[in-house]
Image: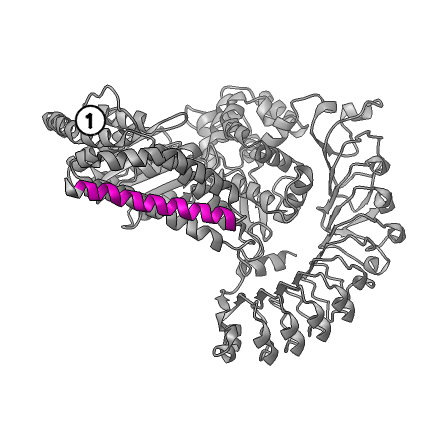
Amino acid sequence: MAGALVGGAMLGAPFGEILKVVVQQTKKTAKFKTHFKRLVATLERIKPVIDDIKKSSDELNHPEEQMRMFIDYLTKGKELILKCPKIKFWNVLDKYVYANKLIRLDNELLRVFQIDVPIKLMSNSMKTLVIMEDLTDKMDVLSTATIRAGGFIGLCGVPGLPELVIGLDHHLYSLKNELLKDDTRVLVISATGGSGKTTLAKTLCHDKEITGIFGKNILYITVSRPSSLKMIVQKIFEHHGIKRSSFQNDEEAKNQLESLFRHLGSGKMLLVLDDVWPESESLVEDLNFKIRGFKILVTSRFSFKRFSSYDLTLLNDDHAKTLFCYSAFPDDGVSVNVRDDLVNKMVKVCKGLPLALKVIGASLCGQPALKWQTTLKRWSDGQSVFESNEDLLLRLQTSIDALDELPIVKKCFLDLGSFPEDDQITGTTLMDMWVELYNLDNEGMYASENLLELSSRNLVNLVPVRRTTGEIEGYCSEHYVTQHDLLRELAIHLSSQEPVPQRERLFIEIDSNSFPIWWSQQTEQPINARILSISTDESFNSTWYDLNVPNVEVVILNIRSKKFTLPKFIEKMSQLKILIVTGYGNYPTQLHNLSLIGSLPNLKRIRFKHVSFSSPDQHKFTTQNLIKLSFVMCELDNVLQSGIIQSPYITDLEIDSCYDLKQLPTGLGKLVNLLKLTVTNCHELQVLPTELSKLLKLKNLRLHCCTKLQELPESIGSLHDLSLLDISDCLNISALPEQMGELSRLGVLIMSGCRGLQELPVSMRKLQQLKDVICDEETSYLWNAFESDDICNVKINIVEEDRVGSFNKILH
């Protein structure tokens, strides 16, 4: 009895501590204030439950052990809360991860403590004895289990395999190695819908090596949605021949299932959970029992950060064709009446996605060659592949429907249809769009969070531009975004269901100067789109029909022709905030008529990529309200010297991979509000202007891979607000100015690949705010001279050679 009272008292102390800590952090930490306030409310709600546990703990059979379980839970929650204030403001990924952890903590506190714990703990012992007796009587039935119809007997038996499994040999080998590692407890096969995750999981369960290890102890459960822990546990009990009417709550179900698994013996066990959705992530954690030899394999179209993940890639061309032909020609997989070139074109449309290969192949099974030709013709004429394949649409659309609870994220997904197939979209381009369209924060943190959400659901892929910066500059700003072509087409299809005048996004493709019928016949009726994306081919001659789109906020022009004239109707777009012009030809597209955008009152952000500014009328291009201007892979000629940059409000200027840039624009010092200056991969730039010192508000200066740049100006010491400096891969910088020590707020210095640098100025000792230095091993030795100084608190981050960045430089 005394031990029980001690156990109850033990629980009260950590509960009081976690409540005290979360109240303190609510007042001190702004980053997670909303989550902390929610936790305070939850803790107040469960306080009466804690009091009841303390009062009745003397009635429990094993009070100290039971109380310790709850104490450990509260202690871990306290540790999580204390870690949150340490997250840096610029670390978007950690903020995203820890915010989700706080949400999970809040939900789990309610789930764990809003139950009748004393009664549950008392009854579990009694019920477990009855279950174990029942289980013993049925063990003979389990021992005689056999394989039938390609799967194991029972509700949780492994389903049989499809008749054709192809392209998974390498994945099976890699997946087995990962799963069988001693430290792997939960492994998630993650990929977009229709990629073959379930087939791979089934193949693994039928593998001889896996069945030799786990024997009959392989349980296979399709989770889908909705689902619950009690439903899954009920199914497992019935699979083992144990009838249970119900469980009072999830905690009882979890405890009895763990007892069942332990009673089954010390043999290894594999639990496969197929098609798990994000709301069931905590369910996986509940089933993650700390039993020797127990493992869980999960398939999901979503990524779960807390578990190890195995990414499933798409089929290569040969395997894709084999799978397609198996569906299209089921008798022998060989085409007789259909030409091979038609087959190849159909396979190409599917882009290696197994679901598309099977569905489209089956839809053409038994059809004459003419049907194949007309289908391809409709797709090439602009008809969506989803209009003729409803099954494919419904099965892929489930991932998008799951975004209904995150309406802004769903809009962000649909916006991706604005860009061409196989495009590498820079993360900053998308974040700039979303900041303006959806009133997100100007720093792009919330926009970056949306991009991470799409990535976690395998609706986009994030590809690093270079590895040297990591998360210090913002997680998504240094990433390209790519997307499977069928997902892009799905975004276009879903955005095009309403009549043209009512669409929020208007995606237009102009081939050989052939406009959509609705456009060439359009009257004065306005179109309400907020996003206008126009793609043209090589032969487009820039002859335009008028277009009335008064509400457009984003214009995206995807160009393949050598010359391109902006349409005159663009000057009527008074709401236009963002203009993105990208040339996709072999040479930079020469732009004309840019003076049209000079008078647009709300234009804030312009991005030019792979275009030329050699036309005389470029000198007329000015805009007064611009805050961000980007030139990427552009042929600049003298455009920067012509007064193009005149807006006093510019805060962000980016010049990347412009091979003919030899000097920065005159009048740079007039950009008194400039916060971020990026000049990267500009190999002809040799010196920086002294008027750089006039940019007194500058916070970020990036000079990555300006290989001929010889020095930083001594006047750089005037930039007292500078917090980030990137001189990585500036090979010809041999010394840094002594005035570096005047950069009193410098927090991040990126200097990997500075092979010509021999020593650091003594004044660097004065950089008391410097926290992170990113460099290679060779450059890191330059910091040895400062080990005994106050600056020794600097974290030296040594990175390997930036092969990703080098590859992208070659592409540029």
Q: Residue at x 53, y 77 (%)?
A: 782
Residue 121 visible in the current orientation: yes
Does residue 697 belong to the magenta stretch?
no
Circle 1 SS class? loop
**Where in the figure is residue 404, as x and y percent of width and height?**
54, 28
**Where in the figure is residue 711, as x and y percent of width and height?**
69, 74
> As drawn, is 801 to the left or to the right of 21?
right
Does residue 5 belong to the magenta stretch?
yes
Instruction: Give the residue at mark 1.
Output: 240
Q: Residue at x 32, y 29 (%)?
A: 229
User: Which range of residues does the magenta coloring cover?
Assistant: 4-28
Q: Nearer the viewer, residue 220 or 441?
A: 441
Q: Nearer the viewer, residue 233 or 722?
A: 722
Q: Nearer the viewer, residue 336 or 104?
A: 104
Number of marks in the image? 1
Residue 281 visible in the current orientation: no
**In the displayed structure, would residue 574 be above or below residue 653?**
above
> As drawn, is 183 to the left or to the right of 133?
right
> As drawn, is 733 to the left or to the right of 329?
right
**Where in the figure is residue 541, as x and y percent of width and height?**
83, 39
